[in-house]
């Protein structure tokens, strides 16, 4: 972990317009939760809000945070200023991941716990379970999207396709896709902690292991890609 | 004292060869990498700085392969042509971040020292986004110098820099070279390279076209047959007297008028032409070089 890289990455996330968009996502989720709470009785909105949070808000926050710490620097080549240093590429990857991960936890996972609590304060255990599930999924999402940003300039598009098409459309039609869906892993972990969360019928042990493997694997991959970073001239 | 050695280094992208089997040794002092745009200078510097894998051949710094070796950056300072995009940082913050990344014992002191070297102490409190081209170039240089590297690589450092800043930058490079650092910079302007570099490496179309002291390179570039078109009130008579000149190697009458002349020694031709004209009573209407562009100089070097 390199504090300078972490600091510069955190500035990259918070700076520009991206920081504002990042903030809008959890705010929208919480506003939605408050509105549903005010207009309805009981816990009608919990499943819908949690579903929206897990399948859309969390991956979007992870995608924006992960691509913010790496994407623009790779795109305009200014990452050479960070790479022309005797700092291990894996340390750089881990530091960038840490900055993006912190953002995902604050703006992605925490709201996932707050929203169900706003909707139904009678079941705090469920809120905590969803928050932990969100943290597990958010960690894996962030790592996965960081790896994507190191692999391709079109990380945002590929990340959106993965989230919306693979996890969203295919995941809802073919149950087998859940085994390869980061969101489903987090959901399953939440179910293991609170039975009030629906069961996706994948082993929760598998879900945790898969999330760890994806996280470690893609962060390591990011470091390796950075080691082979190629500076392209204008010619 | 460090030596950067390229041994048959090549780089191709698919069917396009950007750098073709270049071998050179960059020694302490200042080396100018001269070549027209698109000659492969940036590709070469990317390979020298470990940001591009050679497709064939090797690039080593004091015996260590540069590609994928993170520790070489202890000894290399790189000033890429690419702009600094950390516009939201101040110059001082940017240089300080570079010092910290190098793990220097006192990054703050190193930052102030190098800001003084590049003469950027005052503007360092301003954000990089507000800098002029020359200031950005100097802040880039500061970031590359902050760890006191033995090797300094600069890609087109004088591009877009105003004349006063250019002189300052040149003086700075000379000092770096005099201190025993291995300094290499690229440029497409011969005069620029001549003013700073002792050693010049010429690259054309990805090939190593020439290598030597600036005097040799200058001679190579100027002592070549130069083509002119001379038009006079009597072209045929002008051609007849010109061919008698020792400095003239070929003369032909152009169908559209004028005489095409090949000159081997431009100096004496320039002195002789007005005298001939006056002696013969010829009126010279036009004198124009036909191939004085740098590209033709380079292509001459490649051909010969």
Image (spheres, helix red, strand yellow):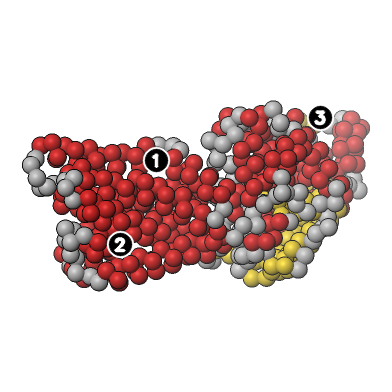
Above or below: residue A140 compared with residue A3: below
Pointer 1 or 2: first along the chain: 1
Between tags 1 and 3, which lies in front?
Answer: 1
Lateral position of residue A124 relative to residue B149, left or right = left
Can residue B225 be seen here? no
Residue A206 seen in this snapshot: yes
Which numbered marker is on residue A18? 1
Badge 2 local density, few (<14 within 10 Å), some, or many (20+)? Answer: many
Could you say which disc has been placed on residue A182 in the image? 2
Camera-nearest label, 3 or 2: 2
Between residue B287 and residue A84, name the one nearer to us: A84
Return the residue found at the far left.
Answer: A41
Residue B132 falls left or right of residue B23: left
Residue occupying image coordinates x 16% and y 37%? A35
Q: What's the CA distance linking mark 1 and mark 2?
A: 23 Å
Residue A2 vertical position relative to residue B111 in the rendered view, above or below? below
Q: Which residue is mark 3?
A: B283
Residue A235: give x, y in percent of width and height.
Answer: 58, 51
Q: Chain for mark 2?
A: A
């Amino acid at each position: 972990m390199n504090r300078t890289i972490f600091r510069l990455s955190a500035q990259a996330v918070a700076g520009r317009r991206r920081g504002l968009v990042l903030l809008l996502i959890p705010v929208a989720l919480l506003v939605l939760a408050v509105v549903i709470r005010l207009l309805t009785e009981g816990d009608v909105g919990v499943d819908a809000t949690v579903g929206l949070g897990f399948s859309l808000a969390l991956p979007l926050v992870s995608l924006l945070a992960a691509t913010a710490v790496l994407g623009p620097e790779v795109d305009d080549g200014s990452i050479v200023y960070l790479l022309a240093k005797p700092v291990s590429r894996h340390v750089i990857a881990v530091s960038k991941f840490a900055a993006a991960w912190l953002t995902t936890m604050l703006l992605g996972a925490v709201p996932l716990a707050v929203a169900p609590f706003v909707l139904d304060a009678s079941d705090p255990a469920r809120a905590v379970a969803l928050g932990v599930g969100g943290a597990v999924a958010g960690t894996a999402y962030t790592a996965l999207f960081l790896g994507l940003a190191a692999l391709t300039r079109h990380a945002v598009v590929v990340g959106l396709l993965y989230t919306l098409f693979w996890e969203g459309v295919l995941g809802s039609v073919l149950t087998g896709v859940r085994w390869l869906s980061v969101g489903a892993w987090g959901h399953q972990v939440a179910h293991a902690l609170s039975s009030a969360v629906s069961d996706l019928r994948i082993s929760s042990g598998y879900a945790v292991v898969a999330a760890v493997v994806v996280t470690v694997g893609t962060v390591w991959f990011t470091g390796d890609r950075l080691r082979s970073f190629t500076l392209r001239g204008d010619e | 004292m460090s030596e950067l050695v390229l041994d048959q280094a090549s780089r191709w992208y698919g069917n396009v060869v950007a750098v073709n089997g270049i071998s050179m040794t960059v020694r302490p002092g200042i080396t100018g990498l001269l070549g027209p745009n698109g000659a492969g200078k940036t590709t070469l510097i990317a390979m020298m700085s470990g940001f591009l894998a050679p497709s064939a051949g090797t690039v080593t710094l004091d015996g260590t392969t540069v590609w994928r070796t993170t520790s070489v950056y202890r000894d290399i300072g790189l000033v890429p042509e690419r702009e600094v995009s950390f516009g939201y940082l101040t110059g001082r913050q940017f240089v300080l971040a570079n010092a910290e990344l190098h793990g220097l014992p006192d990054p703050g002191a190193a930052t102030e020292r190098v800001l003084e070297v590049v003469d950027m102490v005052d503007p360092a409190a301003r954000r990089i986004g507000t800098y002029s081209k020359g200031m950005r170039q100097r802040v880039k240089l500061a970031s590359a110098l902050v760890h006191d590297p033995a090797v300094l690589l600069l890609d087109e450092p004088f591009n877009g820099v105003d004349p006063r800043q250019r002189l300052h930058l040149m003086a700075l490079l000379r000092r770096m070279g005099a201190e025993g650092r291995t300094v290499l910079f690229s440029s497409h302007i011969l005069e620029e390279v001549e003013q700073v570099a002792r050693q010049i490496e010429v690259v054309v179309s990805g090939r190593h076209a020439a290598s030597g002291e600036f005097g040799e390179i200058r001679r190579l570039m100027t002592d070549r047959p130069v083509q002119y078109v001379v038009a006079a009130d009597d072209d045929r008579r002008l051609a007849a007297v010109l061919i008698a000149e020792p400095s003239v190697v070929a003369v032909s009458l152009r169908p559209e008028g004028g005489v095409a002349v090949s000159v081997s020694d431009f100096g004496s031709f320039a002195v002789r032409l007005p005298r001939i004209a006056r002696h013969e009573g010829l009126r010279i209407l036009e004198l124009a070089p036909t191939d004085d562009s740098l590209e033709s100089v380079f292509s001459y070097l490649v051909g010969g």
